Amino acid sequence: MNGETFHDAKTGNELPNINIDVPTNILEQKVKTLEEPYRVEKDTQTHRELQLHRFQEPCMMQLAQAYDINKTDTCKLLEIVQKLQNTVEKQKFIVENKNNCEDIQYLKLDMITVKNNLNKLITNIDDLRNKMMFIERTIEIRNNKFSKLKNRIGILEKEVTKNTTHIIEMNYSYQTLMFTSMNFGAGRDVSSPLNTSTSSSASLNLPPPPTSPPPPPTPPPPPPPPSLPLTTKTGIETSRKVVHETTANTSKAAMKTEKGYFRIPITEEILKSVVLKPPGQWTAGKKCSAK
């Protein structure tokens, strides 16, 4: 027994050496008594495990069955949920379609109002176009009238300038005739080209002037004829001024001849009664001047 070690059956720890001289039978009995509870406990544990295993098998079966049942139920529930989702989606789609239909109706109403407004705008534009065409026509008519008046004014200006040139030429010819009559004898009857342009018979049938005293000494020659006015730059006012000046000069010359030589005076009434003709038809004055 010396040198041997003993271990605890439960814990497995080494037991201290006890140096006691004990017989082997007693030791074996002690060992058996010590091992007996351990064996009993082990047997009870295995028995419990067996009972637990036997109990677990039906539980597992029940759990499996319950799991199958739950699985089928979950499948059914999933199908029900899917159906519910489908119905919800259908209802949602119907509601959206209804809302879309309402929106479409509102859009139709808006389009109708826009169309009516466009028709009104088109009618207003047509009215404005007609008014603009009428205004353009009236403006065109007024422009035509204005252009006609402008052309008429231009023609009148040309006629006035021609008449002023004729009057100036006649006045100059009359002064030359007066100058020649004073130089070559005052006994002749000298008729004015202004008077002869109206009627040659009236100027030839004038009564002879009364006897006048002998003429004074020869006066200086008459001034040269004034320069003719430019037809391109002269206007109505300048032509009237020239006519007024020529009438004033002729009236002064007529007064001088009336005082000095007792000739027929050329007054404004005579000048107003003169009928002016174009240069192609003005022949009476040239014949008188030639005589």
Image (cartoon, rainbow, N blue to C red):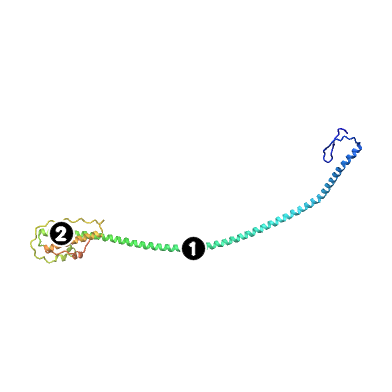
Reading the image, the residue beneath label 1 is 117
Tell me if mark 2 has few (under 14), some (14-19) or many (20+) residues whose alpha carbon lies within 10 angstroms of its own: some
> If the image is split into quadrants, where does the N terminus sit?
top right
Q: Earlier in the sequence, mark 2 or mark 1?
A: 1
Alpha carbon of mark 2 to alpha carbon of mark 1: how far? 85 Å
| Position of residue 88 in the picture relative to residue 137 (left or right) | right
Tell me where residue 276 appears, x and y as whole percent.
21, 62
Question: What amino acid is at disc 1?
Answer: Asn
Above or below, 1 against 184 in this view is above
User: In front here: 32 or 43?
Assistant: 32
User: In front here: 126 or 65?
Assistant: 65
Question: Quick one: which residue is furthest to the top in this view?
Answer: 3
| Position of residue 37 in the picture relative to residue 132 (left or right) | right
User: In front here: 173 or 101?
Assistant: 101
Q: Secondary structure at mark 2?
A: helix
Above or below, 226 against 11 in this view is below
Residue 175 tag number? 2
Tell me where residue 55 appears, x and y as whole percent.
82, 50
Q: Is residue 106 visible?
A: yes
> If the image is split into quadrants, where does the C terminus sit?
bottom left
Q: Is residue 191 visible?
A: no
